[in-house]
Image: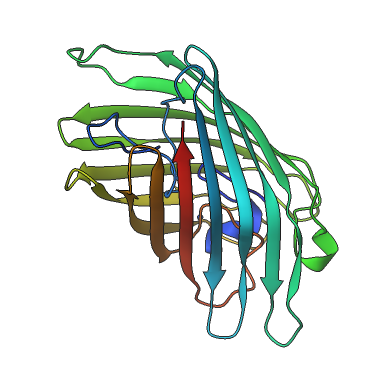
Amino acid sequence: MMFRRNLARSAAACLAAAALTASPPSWAGPPFITDDPEPVELGHWEVYAFSAGAVGAADASGLGPSIEVNYGAAPNLQLHIISGMAYDDPSGQGARLGASDTELGFKYRFITPGEEDWYPQVGIFPLIEIPTGNASRGLGAGYVQAFLPVWIQKDFGKWTTYGGGGYWINPGAANRNYWFAGAVLQRQITKSLALGGEVFHQTSSMVGRGGSAGFNLGGIYDFNEHTHLLFSGGRGGILYAVDAAAVSNPATYYLAVQWTF
């Protein structure tokens, strides 16, 4: 299994690929697969309890319950971890539930414009996927994987756009290293609600399988300054996915409660 930022998923996952406050810093990343360059502020935390998956007519695969934790460890530097449970329910076989793979990473923003500057924020967010899940049961990738992306972001009043992409190192029999790219456009609709959408594409991640593309629509609702609901749904990929290639014509989802403090 692989995770984000946007939770992007490795190899097979492409068939399956923050916080707002009342008066906002912009939000980015979850509930979308495409990420952003904006780290958590120094000394602050983001904690997500989430589930994500691909659901077909007779099969399903995904994560949950799982936890994502981000911490602002230094100016412009965020530390990141995702861990929890994975599930796989292939057609004609029994459902499986167990520990997921673990994602570790850090986000570093190296271009930080002022409010009046024309140029965007730019950052990196390298990730390593540790194979702590049971690959033989469909609950993990079975190999250490890595993602090396660059993300950019620009805000225009109530509108925010961000995107970019990078290179997945994807070892394993019949696997290929591959590229991922995505873009998001979102808007603050009300004081408590923001909505957006994304498109994304990845090149072939496995011998005999072509590249693919997808989309997600979603948003964030603020219950208060510290508690938020994140949601998205789409086709073609999910944020944090177990190998969903076996899920036929899946609808995909992401649902989380986020605490910021």
Residue drawn at 62 percent across, 60 percent down:
64
Is 116 rendered above or below residue 102?
above
Q: Residue at x 49, y 59 (%)?
A: 237
Q: Number of marks in the image?
A: 0
Residue 76, x across and y down, in percent: 47, 15
Q: Estimate the x, y position of residue 150 in percent, counting from the top left.
A: 47, 27
Q: Is residue 217 above or below residue 146?
A: below
Residue 1 seen in this snapshot: no
Depth check: give the residue in front, 127 or 97. Answer: 97
Is residue 150 left or right of 174 when viewed as pictured? Answer: left
Give whichever of 201, 114 is nearer the camera.
114
The residue positioned 29% from the left and 13% from the top of the image is 113
Q: Nearer the viewer, residue 94 or 235?
A: 94
Name the image colouring: rainbow
Q: Is residue 107 above or below residue 53?
A: above
Name the residue: 50% across, 73% down: 250
User: Where residue 33 sits in the image (x, y, percent)?
Assistant: 46, 48
Asked whether, in this view, residue 14 is left or right of residue 61, the answer is left
Classify 135 as above or below 132.
below
**Left or right: 36 as drawn, with respect to 82:** left
Tell me where residue 95 sits by quadrant: bottom right
Residue 132 location (% of width, % of height): 81, 48
Which quadrant holds the N terminus? bottom right
* Residue 111 placement, left or right of 88: left
- Residue 152 in view (yes/no): yes
Q: Quadrant of residue 86?
A: bottom right
